[in-house]
């Protein structure tokens, strides 16, 4: 089944990356949970999520300054 693409003027570049970003962040959080379990540390999931999100925002900020 072919995926329909929207007209180039109706979307911005960020919307194309949303599924990739969501999948990447989900993978990072999942790996952090596994490592947390394996190492017997009790790091709250909220801490992991907030750290991942802040790192992502820093990367997006730096990429925004280049373009």
Image: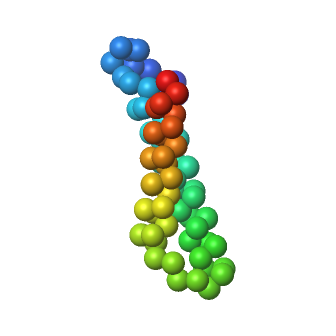
Relative placement, left or right, of 42 versus 34 is: left
Q: Is residue 16 visible?
A: no
Residue found farthest to the right: 38
Q: Return the residue nearer the eye: 13 or 62.
A: 62
Q: In which quadrant of the rendered view does residue 36 lie?
A: bottom right
Q: Is residue 50 above or below residue 43?
A: above
Residue 4 position, x and y percent, is: 44, 22
Q: In which quadrant of the rendered view does residue 38 lie?
A: bottom right
Identity of the residue drawn at 41% across and 32% down: 15
Identity of the residue drawn at 43% across and 62% down: 50
Q: Is residue 34 visible?
A: yes
Q: Is residue 3 above or below residue 7?
A: below
Q: Is residue 20 above or below residue 13?
A: below
Residue 6 position, x and y percent, is: 39, 19
Q: Return the residue nearer the eye: 41 or 54.
A: 54
Identity of the residue drawn at 52% across and 43% down: 59
Q: Is residue 51 above or below residue 9?
A: below
Relative placement, left or right, of 46 versus 40 is: left
The figure's colour scheme reads: rainbow
Relative placement, left or right, of 38 versus 8 is: right
Residue 9 position, x and y percent, is: 36, 14
Residue found farthest to the left: 10
Identity of the residue drawn at 48% across and 35% down: 17
Residue 41 position, x and y percent, is: 58, 83
Q: Return the residue nearer the eye: 6 or 11.
A: 11
Q: In which quadrant of the rendered view does residue 46 lie?
A: bottom left
């Amino acid at each position: 089944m072919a995926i329909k693409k929207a007209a180039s003027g109706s979307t911005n570049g960020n919307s194309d990356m949303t599924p990739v970003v969501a999948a990447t962040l989900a993978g990072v959080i999942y790996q952090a949970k596994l490592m947390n379990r394996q190492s017997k540390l009790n790091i709250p999931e909220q801490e992991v999520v907030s750290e991942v999100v802040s790192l992502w925002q820093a990367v997006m900020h730096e990429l925004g300054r280049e373009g």
